[in-house]
Structure formats: structure tokens, C-alpha cells
Amino acid sequence: TKQNLSIEVLNQVVSKLVKARTVYVMGFGLSAHLAGMLALHLQPFCSHVVEVVGYGGTEVAAGHLASISDKDVLILISFPRYANDAIKLAQFARDHDTCIVSMTDSTASPLAAVGDFLLLAPSTHPVLPSSSIAAIALIEALVSSLMVSNRKNVEKAMKLTEALSAYLHGSDASSKSSSKELAMRKKKKSESD
């Protein structure tokens, strides 16, 4: 994945994401979970993120893309087996002058010709139709680059960590809360005995 990744292209994609009114993330079939993961990680750092497919398939995806424009970015994710729906909907976005980032496995992929930017993650697997390991690494590289791309995003990451820390096991806030709850339970039990 690292050999196929151009830092220059990655930085150009990050620049487009930062400026986008809406970032649409689309993946069908085996790529749907990757699209969901990417959308989740982009949300704190982009103005508006839409996971295009979700639970509704092609009809819902088309509905999400109905108002796509040149102010938006569509990240199109497809690995073997490639989904025709993804290609057709990407062409719809292309017809509306949307910037398209294709995330796929090789330059021979039908998605390679659709995108303005191409991010490659090899997916060959001896048994499965494709492997997601390299795609996950690519997603993490993209999100990390976006996170550190400017001071504002670094501050957002710090605030997000702060907000979540109270809910994580072993953090000071959750430990104090758990200690208080345990003490209260012990007190109630001793009172009832």
C-alpha cells in the first residue's frame, strides 16, 4: 500500500476534503463496511459527511447524490467484485462536476478512470474475492493526514479525545465514577444486611 501511495496525491485529496461543502462516501457490497468506517472517521474533520449507501442500497444512494455539485467531493470505494451501481452513480456525480476520489485495488479497476484522484490499495487474497487489509491502512493514512493537516483539525481531535475520555474504561473519570458506584452498592448492601 505504501509503495502505491503518492504523498502528493494524498495531500491534494486532503485539501479537497477540507474545502468541500459535503463529502459523500460510497461503497457497495464488500466495500460498504469500508465506506462506513471512512465516513465515521471523517465526520469530526469535514463540514458534512454523508455515507451514501447505508442500509438502503442503490435507491437510497441515488437519493443522497441528487443534490451533489462541484462544491462536494465523492469518495468512491470499490474492490473486487466491483459494483456497477457505484460506477453509474459516480458518472452521475461526474456529470455534476463533482470531485471524485476513487479508492480501489489497481489501475485496471473500472473505478480508476472515473476519479480525479486515485488511491490504490492492493486487495488480492488466495481465497476471498478481495482483502480489506490494505484498504483499511489506506483509510487510516487518509484520515491521519486530514487530522494533522491544520491546527484546527488537531484541536478538534484533542476535543474529541477529551469528550470521549470520560466514557472509556480505565480513564480517570470512568474510574472515579465506577469507584463511587461500587462504594454506593457496598453501602446499600451493608444497610440491607
Image (spheres, rainbow, N blue to C red):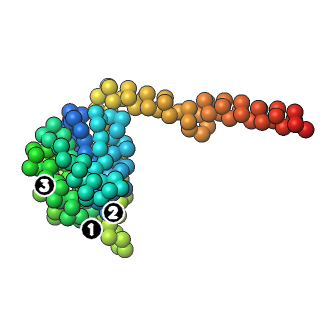
Determine whether label 2 and label 1 are within 8 Å by CB.
yes
For the point 37% across and 49% down, which residue is it?
A: 37
Q: Indicate which disc residue 91 carries.
A: 3
Q: Secondary structure at mark 1?
A: loop
Q: Is residue 131 above or below residue 120?
A: below
Quadrant placement of the C terminus: top right
Q: Is residue 188 above or below residue 118?
A: above
Marks 2 and 3, how far apart at CA: 20 Å
The amino acid beneath tag 3 is Gln
**Nearest to N terminus: mark 3 or mark 1:** 1
- Residue nearest the observer in this picture, 134 or 22: 22
Left or right, residue 28 beside residue 180:
left
Q: Secondary structure at mark 2?
A: helix
The amino acid beneath tag 1 is Arg
Left or right, residue 23 beside residue 181:
left
Marks 2 and 1, how far apart at CA: 8 Å
The amino acid beneath tag 2 is Leu
**Nearest to N terminus: mark 2 or mark 1:** 2
Q: Indicate which disc residue 30 carries.
A: 2
Q: Is residue 139 above or below residue 176?
A: below
**Nearest to N terminus: mark 2 or mark 3:** 2
Left or right, residue 22 beside residue 171:
left
Q: Secondary structure at mark 3?
A: helix
Q: Which residue is mark 1?
A: 81
